[in-house]
Amino acid sequence: MADLGRREFKVGGVEYPLAANSDDLVTTDKAVYNILQFFKSVIITHMGDKFNIQATKANILDARNQLITEPIMQLVPYNPANFLEEVQYKFPLISAFRRDETYREETRVWFEVTYDLDVMYMLPPLTAQQMYHLDMFRSHVRNILLNRLELGYDPDYNNGELVFQTAGIQEIKFVKSRYLDLENPKNTKTFFPTILMTFQVKERKNEISGSFPELTGIDGEIDISDGYQPNNFNLIEFQIDT
């Protein structure tokens, strides 16, 4: 049987078979990797200076008693709320993780995957006085991401790169956001002010460029038949070389 080039395929921005040395998000989860990098960049660009001023006023300190001046200190490609008691994260952080997928077969050769992507922006545990200075940044994050999502790029991120195209995302839209007060399991008197934003993302199966063998020719024939195999009549045989 002719080699039809079906050994490789691509879903979203990820190619299969996975390369053995692909042990990071850059190649194995391009959607989450690129979204986190892009969101970090636009948040710093559009509210970084003001966050620095407000965090300094509130004297926000990290676990090492160092002043926090950046609006993003860590990127997390899973739900950090499940591990607050065992992992010492660097706050503020932003995370992205999938939830609730659906599948649709568009044709016999390609399909779509649609899923909810939760993006969580978490501030460190704050007192009431500190909340006065920093709580508004949860809504600023939502405004920034909503606007940049609508635009599809940011001029200050990789020279205006079309990041969702790079990520292999066919479609992405902002669905909703929720303001959460996640309790600190080590100290129930404090909590992590959080905004949880849900995006609907669509990826599709794609063919990998160059994975199909080069077409060198077509051979065929046209037969006339009355329905009985012995009576077939070979009318035309043809060969086309490319």
Image (tube, rainbow, N blue to C red):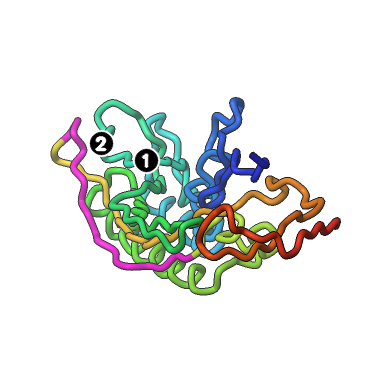
Quarter of the N terminus within the rendering = top right
**To which quarter of the image does residue 172 belong?**
bottom left
Report the Cα–Cα distance between label 2 and label 1. 9 Å
For badge 1, the amino acid type reads: Tyr
- Compared across the picture, whether 154 is left or right of 212 comes to left
Q: Residue furthest front?
A: 231
Q: Which range is magenta?
A: 171-187
Q: Secondary structure at mark 1?
A: loop
Q: Nearer the viewer, residue 230 or 99?
A: 230
User: x%, y% of residue 29?
Assistant: 50, 43
Q: Nearer the viewer, residue 123 or 175?
A: 175
Residue denoted by label 2 = 82
Q: Residue furthest right?
A: 241
Residue 25 lies, in percent from the top left, at: 53, 39
Using the image, determine if residue 110 lies above or below residue 126: below
Crowdedness near tag 1: few (<14), some (14–19) or many (≥20) residues, C-alpha within 10 Å? some
Q: Position of residue 173 (x, y in %)?
A: 41, 68
Residue located at (51% from left, 69% from top)? 148
The residue located at (65%, 67%) in the rendering is 155
Query: Mainly helix, strand or loop, the magenta region?
Result: strand
Q: Quadrant of residue 239?
A: bottom right
Return the residue nearer the eye: 239 or 147.
239
